[in-house]
Image (tube, grey):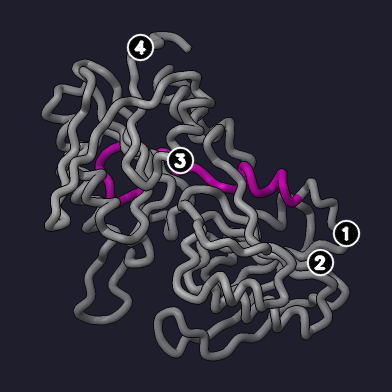
Amino acid sequence: MSEKNSFLVFSGTNTRYLAEKICASLGCPLGNLVVTRFSDGEFAVSYEESIRGRDVFLVQSTFPNSDNLMELLLMIDAAKRASARHIIAVIPYFGWARQDRKDKPRVSIGAKLVADLLSVAGIDRLITMDLHADQIQGFFDVPVDHLYASGVILPYLQSLHLKDLVIASPDVGGSKRANTYAKYLGCPLVLCNKTRARANVVDSMQIIGEVKDKNVVIVDDMVDTAGTIAKAADIMKAAGAKSVRACASHCVMSGPASERVQGSALEEIVFTDSIPYSNRCAKVKQLSVADMIAETIRRVVENESISSQYLV
């Protein structure tokens, strides 16, 4: 890589596992950053090496709790005050992305607020993956490199050599993503039409399309409580599907999600490692996006196009 010492990679506390793999792929050491925590829950960050005039890549997913976002904001502020040349936030999982619009009166638009916080803190570029809504890129006035987990998930699905394959979307909102997978794999598309009683609670669901004697793969961007995915899998299995799998970019898996997946008709559920997953569920498999993010960092440093690494 040219200008070998022109950039440095640092990590927040809870995304260090991924940053270490990214640095191993890049062949560079992970930067030395210390987070000091106080007894009242407040914390401070400091760089333990000079970053003056360097391109600084800060790896941190902003999954709950809010400490992860606050830690990233402090990292950005400290880098700006330490005279970094460019500050690039690498956020594999961009939290609050489900709040991308006013869907009812008197609600916040959390994704726009987070974008404003990052911009005011001082980022020069954002690298992220599979935003819940593509239009969130427009909330930023700095360049956004939007990566897709399909780069690692599609090769895995092809390696399974499933016959009579059908791609399914768990809701109408995810139909574009699922249709992209179906076109790439050359197989039919099935939709699930769901209604919600309230957030995280599915009221009813109907299948639009044929799943009898098919191997179904449900495609989504994230799995939170796993209520939708588990219900869709059970309905499809009851409708005669030979097997039901699921794949999603982000492994939120909160609350009873692991138990729901384990008790569902799903044979397996495949995620990336954009979010750490500590609960052990035999049906959960994680694929690493470290090499993909590392290659994007390399191309940003060397001013190369990143679009050629997209499969779809």
Q: Earlier in the sequence, mark 2 or mark 1?
A: 1
Q: Are marks 3 and 2 in contact (CB under 8 Å)?
A: no
Closer to us: mark 1 or mark 4? 4
Circle 3 residue: 17
Circle 2 residue: 215
Q: Earlier in the sequence, mark 3 or mark 1?
A: 3
Q: Is residue 27 above or below residue 70?
A: above
Mark 3 → mark 1, Cα distance in angstroms: 36 Å
Residue in the image at 50% along x and 66% along y? 253
Circle 1 residue: 163
Q: Is residue 62 left or right of residue 83?
A: right
Q: Is residue 303 left or right of residue 264?
A: left
Judge the density around disc 4: few (<14), some (14-19), many (≥20) Cα neighbours within 10 Å. Answer: few
Mark 2 → mark 4, Cα distance in angstroms: 49 Å
Circle 4 residue: 5
Q: Is residue 156 magenta?
A: yes
Q: Earlier in the sequence, mark 1 or mark 4?
A: 4
At label 1, the amino acid type is: Lys
